[in-house]
Each structure stands twice: as structure tokens, then as C-alpha cells.
Image (cartoon, helix red, strand yellow):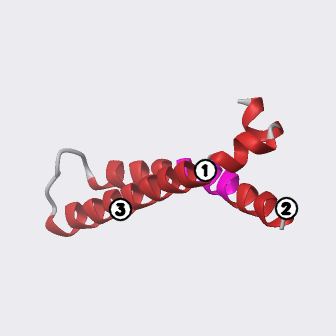
Amino acid sequence: MVKHWEDREYLKKGIGSAGLWGHFFWFLGIIFAILGVISDVTGRALGLTSMSWFLLAIVVSLLSIPLFIGWAIAWYLKSLEK
């Protein structure tokens, strides 16, 4: 994992994939939050209780932060070369 932060060329190659996975986790967190709201409003458990959906949304959204940080650093390094 250290190579990801120390090797600039490796980091710049991952611009597309890091952004894609970051967005995937971010939108998955939004979907989980919506499921939690629906579960809370209807009073039914949609597979999980509403609090579990909210906690899952928080965890998945937090997983996207390191990916977005790597994506932002890669764009910054790419812009320095111009």
C-alpha cells in the first residue's frame, strides 16, 4: 500500500479507477441511507433495521474518502507537470 503513495507514476495511472470506486462507494452510501429512511418511515425492516442501514451508509461513505483523497492528489500531481 505504501507504493500507492510514494510512486507518482503509479498514483497518476489510478486517476480513473480511484475516482470510479470512490463514486461507487459514495452512491452506495446514499442508497443505503435512502433505504434507512424508507425503513424508518414505513416502520418495517427492509432486511435490516433502519439504524443498521444508516450505520452501513456511514461506513460505506467513509470508505470513499481515501479513494477521493488519492484521486485529488493524482490530479494535483498531474497538473504540476504541465
Give x and y (percent) for residue 67: 60, 50
Read off the residue under disc 1. Answer: 67
Which residue is at the front of the view, 1 or 33?
1
Image quarter (top left, top right, bottom left or bottom right) of the C terminus: bottom right
Residue at (18% x, 45% y) in the render: 47
Read off the residue under disc 2. Answer: 81
Mark pair 2, 1: CA separation: 22 Å
Give x and y (percent) for residue 15: 62, 53
Q: Which residues are magenta?
A: 62-71
Q: Is residue 48 left or right of residue 58?
A: left
Q: Earlier in the sequence, mark 2 or mark 1?
A: 1
Residue at (33% x, 52% y) in the render: 53
Q: At numbered mark 1, what does the secondary structure look like: helix, strand or loop?
A: helix
Query: Type of residue at label 1?
Result: Leu
Give x and y (percent) for residue 57: 41, 54
Q: Earlier in the sequence, mark 3 or mark 2?
A: 3
Q: Residues within 10 Å of mark 2 (few under 14, many from 20)?
A: few
Which is in the foreground here, disc 3 or disc 2?
A: 2
Q: At numbered mark 2, what does the secondary structure look like: helix, strand or loop?
A: loop
Q: Is residue 22 left or right of residue 80?
A: left
Residue at (80% x, 58% y) in the render: 77
Read off the residue under disc 3. Answer: 33
Mark pair 3, 2: CA separation: 40 Å
Give x and y (percent) for residue 44: 13, 57
